[in-house]
Amino acid sequence: MEKAILLVGGKGTRLAPFTNSTPKPMIRIAGAPVTEHQILKARAAGVKEIVLATSYLAEVFQPYFGNGEKFGVSIKYAVEQEPLGTGGAIANAAKALSLKPNESLFIFNGDVLSEHNLAAQSQFHQELGADATLHLIEVVDASSYGCVPIDRDGRVLDFLEKMPQPKAKTINAGCYIFKSEIIEKLPHGEVISIERDAFPKWLSDDCKIYGYLDSSYWIDMGTPETMVRASRDLVRRNHGAALILPSATIHPSAVIDGGSFIEADSLINSDVRISGSIIAAGAIIESGAIIENSYIASQSRVKKGSNLREIIQGF
């Protein structure tokens, strides 16, 4: 499977103040914007051509990603002048791809990171001859999510809204595979939700919709807290105790661990302790400060002896 659409047009209101001047998929975690992590994952699975479906602050993406050459893929852009919802965004972005009959492609939600096996999801989709295959995960308490019950073969039985006592523990994890024919069912230029409108309609039309159930790491970065947690998890997995960019200045007595990400040109002074946090570019941390599971914004300052835990500071 060589083509993909990344849905990166959301405003990310729950992530304010992060998203006041930066679209949420461009927030840097573990050394790179969220979208870059997704592009590299798609490339590793064999994807060669990607369309970024943009809307909010669309002008931010192209200067960074260009034509995709430096990331080893071809990147195109589909800009929504007015937000079209997830379904409308997919229909709009698909016009930038030359999809063949019966060809399938990946769709990624722009605020989700997952370590599930894309190749395995693709194989599952193809072996079943599915029209659409959703990546699903199982959670202990699904009351905060819409549920997607499946039968023993993985065929989707229903799409259920949030409810106090969910009828299933399987939820939509935000990575889809669609056949070109099912994308053609989406109306063009209309606001439509893929989750609330298209999926139930396709199910009622007896389309073959399957759920690929997987237990790999997954996180929805919808809040500042989960954004910091995602960065922490990625750093621990890929870099160890911390990721410190070369132009950061770190005093020898400072202790930095717990999956912290220290951005360029930041200054960490003596006897500072930082754990599980993001210190953005140009921030100054004065002597003796303790920072845990927090985000310190670019060019901001943490005063001497401060003790910060689960704090968003500097906006």
Image (cartoon, helix red, strand yellow):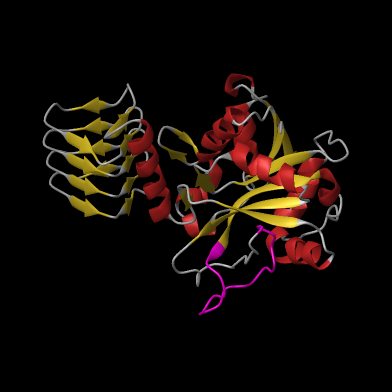
Residue lying at 70% horizontally and 37% vertically, measured from the top left: 4
Give the residue at x 83% y 53%.
189
Residue farthest to the bottom, as pictured: 164
Q: Is the magenta stretch mostly helix, strand or loop?
A: loop
> Residue 66: horizontal and vertical position, in percent?
64, 25
In front: 49, or 131? 131
Residue 247, by quadrant, is: top left
Is 224 positioned to the left or the right of 44 in the image? left
Residue 97's x, y, as percent? 80, 35
- Residue 9 on image: x %, y %: 64, 48
Dividing the picture into quadrants, the one containing residue 289 is top left
Tell whether 279 sits left or right of 84: left
Residue 166 included in the magenta stretch of the image: yes
Asked whether residue 81 is in view, the answer is no
Q: Which stretch is magenta?
A: 153-170
Asked whether 310 falls inside the magenta stretch, the response is no
102 or 89, which is in the foreground? 102
